[in-house]
């Protein structure tokens, strides 16, 4: 038999409430991962009570990540937010391949036992990063921060390893 499955195994999105005051804002404020898998599969009935299946997993994916950047203000010795960073991936280039396999054993009509494995898939994302300065109110410190921040949209890359699964 041949089958084709289309699904979204990973749809993760989380934005922290009060993201600008959240204590972890320098790690993450918003994280969104969207995926769509296309899964062609072949199955074989090896014996009347035993079947095997193998297939490919083609994953399309998009990611958005946001966080703030911190710095120590040398004039006040306090940690302040100096920039907001947002990464958006391009949808057309973010894809990868994996594979899957499954077995089904049916010793009697009323009972069956099955297992499946899906390989790890690593998606390399390319996209743009935008750095937006957050003014602190200190002109000298703000000028020093501005000199270090990338200007305009920057090309960025990030990779996400989607784990292997056994069911």
Image: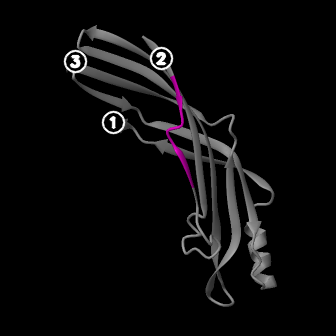
Q: Quadrant of residue 20?
A: bottom right
The image shows residue 109 at horizontal and vertical percentages of 22, 18
* Alpha carbons under labels 2 and 1: distance apart: 20 Å
Neighbour class for label 1 at 10 Å: few (<14), some, many (≥20)? few
Residue named by callout 2: 3
Q: Work out which residue is located at the far left of the displayed protein and give it.
A: 107
Q: Nearer the viewer, mark 1 or mark 3?
A: 3
Residue at image point 66% right, 43% down: 126
How are the residues colored?
Answer: one colour
Mark before the other along the chain sequence, 3 or 2: 2
Using the image, tell me which numbered label, if any, was put on residue 109.
3
Quadrant holding the N terminus? top left
Q: Nearer the viewer, residue 153 or 118?
A: 118
* Alpha carbons under labels 1 and 3: distance apart: 25 Å
Lateral position of residue 158 relative to residue 113, left or right: right
* Alpha carbons under labels 3 and 2: distance apart: 23 Å
**Pointers 1 and 3 in contact (C-beta within 8 Å):** no
Residue at image point 61% right, 60% down: 30
Q: Nearer the viewer, mark 3 or mark 2?
A: 3
- Helix, strand or loop status at disc 2: strand
**Pointers 2 and 1 in contact (C-beta within 8 Å):** no
Residue named by callout 1: 166
Quadrant holding the C terminus? top left
Mark before the other along the chain sequence, 2 or 1: 2
Q: Quadrant of residue 127?
A: top right
Q: Is residue 129 above or below residue 99?
A: below
Neighbour class for label 3 at 10 Å: few (<14), some, many (≥20)? few
- Helix, strand or loop status at disc 1: strand
The image shows residue 131 at horizontal and vertical percentages of 73, 62
The image shows residue 29 at horizontal and vertical percentages of 60, 64
- Helix, strand or loop status at disc 3: loop
Mark before the other along the chain sequence, 1 or 3: 3
């Amino acid at each position: 038999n041949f089958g084709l499955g289309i699904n979204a195994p990973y749809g993760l999105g989380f934005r922290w409430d009060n993201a600008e005051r959240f204590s972890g804002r320098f790690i993450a404020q918003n994280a969104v991962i969207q995926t769509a898998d296309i899964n062609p599969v072949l199955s074989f009935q090896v014996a009347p009570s035993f079947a095997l299946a193998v297939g490919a997993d083609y994953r399309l994916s998009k990611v958005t990540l946001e966080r703030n950047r911190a710095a120590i203000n040398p004039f006040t010795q306090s940690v302040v937010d100096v920039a907001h960073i947002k990464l958006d991936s391009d949808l057309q280039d973010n894809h990868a391949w994996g594979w899957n396999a499954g077995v089904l054993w049916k010793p009697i009509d009323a009972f069956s036992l099955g297992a499946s494995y899906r390989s790890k898939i690593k998606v390399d994302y390319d996209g743009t990063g935008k750095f937006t300065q957050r003014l602190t109110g200190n002109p000298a410190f703000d000028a020093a921060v501005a000199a270090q921040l990338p200007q305009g949209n920057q090309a960025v890359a990030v990779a996400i390893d989607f784990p292997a699964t056994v069911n």
